[in-house]
Each structure stands twice: as C-alpha cells, then as structure tokens.
Image (cartoon, rainbow, N blue to C red):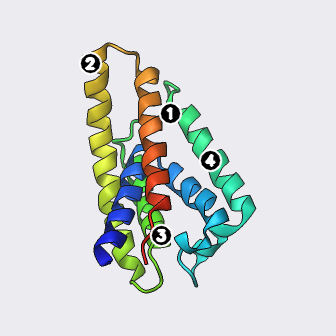
C-alpha cells in the first residue's frame, strides 16, 4: 500500500510543478466530501474546512491568470522552484494517510514537483514550437493537465 501512497503524493507533486496552488485546491475540494484524503492529526485537517476550499481555489485561479502575464518570472528561477518544491512537499505530506510517515509523502511530492516543474517547462516549449500556438494558449493546455492530475490524485483512494 505504501506504493499507492507514494504514487499519489508524486502525482500531486507533479501537478504542483505545473501549477503550485492547484493540488492543494483539489485536496481541499475533495476533502469537503471525503475528509479522509487529508492527514488526520496535522495542520492539513484545515483543508477540510469550506473556507479552505474557497481560499485555495481562489489562489489556484489567481495563479493560472498570473501565469499568462508577460512580467511573471520564469518557473526556472530559484524562488519559483523553491516555492513549487515547498508546495509539493506540503501536498505530499497532507495526502499521506496517518498509517504512514508524512515524510514519505513529502519526499515523493518534492520529486514530483521537480519533475513537473522542469518537465512541464520543456513540454510547454515543445508544444509551442510544434503547434505554433502562442504561449498563453499552450499555458491553457498546461492548466488543464494540472487540474486533471490534481483531481485524479486527490480522489485516489489509499489507506
């Protein structure tokens, strides 16, 4: 079962590498119906509160809008990478059931966030070059992937 825990945390981290706020929003939304998706006995239980879903959802939408603005720094700069690594760790730990160590989920979330950050950048450049689409259009595809991965992972059942 540890494998499923690590897989879910990795996929949440992968989505975090694409859009840092989206996986926490997905966890908060799913936790409204299934409180078991967040770790009991930790600060993550606050994601079960309705205002957490509202706050994290607004944060995710804000990030998606900001991502399309020309003056936003590259995801390859140190502060952005650091933020995505931090959110990957938090999401991975928050989604780890109490029967496992939170650090296992956090580590998988960090690895996923790094893969999503750098792989997402390369995929975005590749897709833009292959299709000729403007960057904001390619970013919308990336948004859809981040949302899909986040919801898929947040809804995954692990015990």
Q: Which residue is mark 3?
A: 95
- Residue 35, compared with residue 81, is above or below; it is below
Residue at the spot of label 4: 59
Question: Which numbered disc flags the more N-terminal residue, 4 or 2?
Answer: 4
Circles 3 and 4, Cβ within 8 Å, touching? The answer is no
- CB under 8 Å between discs 4 and 2: no
Q: Along the polypeptide, which appears first: circle 3 or circle 4?
A: 4
Which residue is labeled 2 in the image?
129
Instruction: Please tell me how crowded label 2 is: few (under 14), some (14-19), or many (20+) other residues with Cα within 10 Å.
Output: few
Marked residue nearer the N-terminal end (4 or 1): 4
Residue 90 in the image, given as x and y percentages of width and height: 47, 66
The residue pinned by badge 1 equals 67
Residue drawn at (58%, 54%), measured in percent from left and top? 25
Q: Earlier in the sequence, mark 2 or mark 3?
A: 3
Task: Report helix, strand or loop for mark 1.
Answer: helix
Q: Quadrant of residue 55?
A: bottom right
Q: Nearer the viewer, residue 37 or 132?
A: 37
């Amino acid at each position: 079962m540890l494998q499923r825990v690590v897989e879910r945390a990795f996929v949440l981290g992968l989505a975090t590498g694409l859009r840092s706020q989206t996986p926490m929003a997905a966890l908060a939304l799913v936790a409204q119906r299934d409180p078991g998706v967040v770790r009991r006995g930790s600060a993550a239980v606050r994601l079960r509160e309705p205002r957490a879903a509202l706050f994290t959802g607004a944060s995710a939408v804000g990030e998606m809008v900001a991502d399309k603005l020309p003056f936003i720094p590259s995801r390859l700069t140190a502060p952005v990478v650091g933020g995505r690594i931090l959110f990957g760790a938090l999401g991975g730990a928050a989604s780890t059931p109490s029967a496992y160590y939170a650090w296992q989920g956090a580590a998988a979330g960090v690895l996923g966030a790094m893969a999503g950050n750098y792989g997402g950048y390369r995929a975005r450049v590749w897709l833009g070059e292959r299709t000729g689409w403007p960057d904001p259009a390619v970013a919308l595809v990336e948004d859809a992937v981040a949302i899909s991965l986040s919801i898929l992972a947040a809804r995954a059942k692990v015990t």
